Image (cartoon, rainbow, N blue to C red):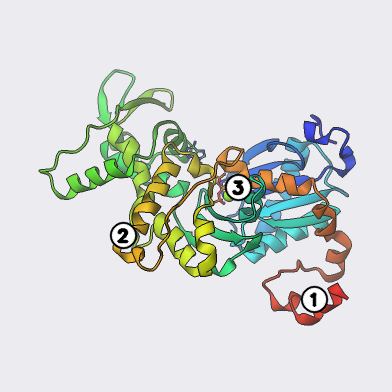
Amino acid sequence: MPLFEGLGGIGLINEKNTTVVLDIGTAYTKAGFAGEYGPRIITRSEVKCRETGKNVPLLQYKDENELRHHLVDFIHKLYFRCLLVNPKDRRVVVVENLLCPTVVRNTLAKVLFRHYEVLSVLFVPSHLVALMTLGITTGLVLDLGHKEATLMPIYEGVVVFHAWQALPFGGSLIEKSLSELLLDRAVATTEDGTEHRLSSIMQDIPNRYLEDIKVRTCFVSTLERSSCLQNNKYDRSIEPPPPPPSVQYPLEGHHILTVPGTVRELAAEALFERDQDVLTLATMVLNALLKCPIDTRHKLAENMVIIGGTASMKGMKHRILAEVRAAAASEQYRQILPIPSFLLHHPPAKDNYVSWLGGAILGATEAVMLRSYHRDQYLASDVVPDWCNLIFNTCEDRDEKFA
Ligand SMILES: Nc1ncnc2c1ncn2[C@@H]1O[C@H](COP(=O)(O)OP(=O)(O)OP(=O)(O)O)[C@@H](O)[C@H]1O
Ligand SMILES: [Mg+2]
């Protein structure tokens, strides 16, 4: 039973029936109860390795067996140490990225049904349920997570799957760029007051510091400012804009790291540089629109939603919108994609748990009873139906259902 009963549960749902909502991300997992306004816990997606005893990423595995062990341990931690409820005979809503590997989905179902004996599982696409928080059915949803940026257009509640886009532009890329910049340009003051280059004190910066420095000190500069910086890089005669102030950051208790202003603003530029295929976050949006039916494009462009933890970075959404508008006005797209306006929604939750909130809203409706996959069904067939697999999507199957 939940230790702290949320407002959403009062009188409407009795605690035995409270559905658990899980959003398992590469970096962070959000877990809580359906009908509530936010997750009870946002925890790192890490487990203690059974052999070495060290913390390892949940979704880093050699084979299916290892993944199963990871999931068993992790879900035990979520239910018995974080949510304080018994998983047995309780419903679960799993918010999943449609691009997540099938093996993860199947192993998760196996662990939930066979090991923890949950009553039913409802897998919901994270991009689709993010729209539920806004009460709209059409939107172009861009998820800027830790590992990658994924984009999925949704039109009238239907995911336009063939228009999906994904690029490895997430929080981890910013951390990598930040690490290189810091080792190249930052100085650290030691206890005796002397200054040293950071690279002479440490070979690489531990991830826990990198993420903290990123979140506390870095920001995304405007498109105009970034263009000035780029121009200065290629032509030194052009005066660069004045740098932002540097920030002092205590490192390992006995060093003071000075994070230069240029590093604070350049770290996130990695997301806006064109990769080898000349793809950026902006071209991702425009290419997805090009793949959508022509009469849906205007509506999709006017209903953009940006979610995921990395979108919380200061200036990120503003910059993405400016980049998309600039790319749409460029020679490459102006003729083929004449879209007058791109507009952005602001979901009613912190960016990193918008999808979780969508799952919590869906989990409090009747859909969870009507659409969930039941334990008995799973135990009879031992597979999770996948709508994009023809075995589960044949005409006879549909005819039987609607007979
Ligand atoms: N305020 C912030 N500023 C900058 N970055 C942030 C902020 N808050 C969170 N992040 C970053 O967002 C990322 C986590 O976001 P999120 O929880 O959406 O990822 P995830 O769901 O675990 O990853 P994925 O969706 O790729 O599987 C981390 O890299 C974290 O450092
Ligand atoms: Mg995510």
Q: Which amino acid type is marked by label 1?
A: Arg
In what element is the residue under mark 1?
helix
Label 2: which residue? 330
Q: Is residue 374 left or right of residue 194?
A: right
- Mark in front: 2 vs 3: 2
Q: Is residue 164 visible?
A: no
Q: Say which quarter of the image contains residue 62.
A: bottom right
In what element is the residue under mark 3?
loop
The quarter in which the N terminus is drawn is top right
In what element is the residue under mark 2?
loop
Label 2 crowd (10 A; few <14 / some 14-19 / many >=20): few
Which tag, 3 or 1, sits closer to the chain's start?
Answer: 3
Asked whether the beta carbons under mark 1 and mark 2 sit within 8 Å of each other, the answer is no
Q: CA distance from mark 1 to mark 2?
A: 46 Å
Q: Is residue 278 left or right of residue 230?
A: right
Q: Which amino acid type is marked by label 2?
A: Ser
Label 1 crowd (10 A; few <14 / some 14-19 / many >=20): few
Between 220 and 103, the one nearer to me in the picture? 220
Q: In the image, residue 227 lies at what x, y percent?
A: 26, 46
Between 22 and 160, the one nearer to me in the picture? 160
> Residue at 71% across / 69% down in the picture?
386
Q: Which mark is residue 52?
A: 3
